[in-house]
Amino acid sequence: MGNALEGRVVAITGAGNGIGREHALLFASEGAKVVVNDLGGAGDGTGADAGPAQKVVEEIQSAGGEAVAHTEDISTWDGGASLVQAAVD
């Protein structure tokens, strides 16, 4: 784990898979605490699954980093506000 981002908190959307996942892992490897946001829906936007976000959190934690999963829909005001609150907490 690096320390370029030690003491920083980042919220990364779409972090359960693909490029979002890679960003989450990179930020964590540099010392950031990561809020892994991913609704976990299907490619067509339907459904929800906490699994992808939680899997990334577990990867970060097993590497010695700190992360929490956030699986709310941030396209809503309440979802966006809860993401910011998760980062503050």
Image (tube, rainbow, N blue to C red):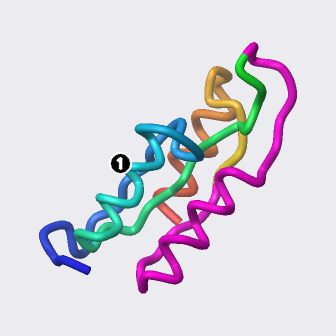
Q: What residue does disc 1 label?
A: 23
- Identify the image quadrant of residue 80: top right
Q: Amino acid at mark 1?
A: His
The residue at 63%/45% (across/down) is: 82
Q: Is residue 82 above or below residue 32?
A: above
Residue at the far right: name it: 47
- Magenta-span inclusion, residue 7: no
**Label 1: how many residues lie within 10 Å, few (<14), some (14-19) or many (20+)?**
some
The residue at 44%/44% (across/down) is: 12
The residue at 39%/60% (across/down) is: 25
What stretch of residues is rendered in magenta?
44-69
The residue at 57%/60% (across/down) is: 56
Residue 76 at what x, y percent from top left?
67, 22
Residue 13 at what x, y percent from top left?
50, 38
Residue 24 at what x, y percent from top left?
41, 54
Q: Is residue 80 above or below residue 52?
A: above
Residue at the far top: name it: 44
- Magenta-span inclusion, residue 57: yes
Residue 5 at what x, y percent from top left?
19, 67
Q: Is residue 41 above or below residue 18?
A: above
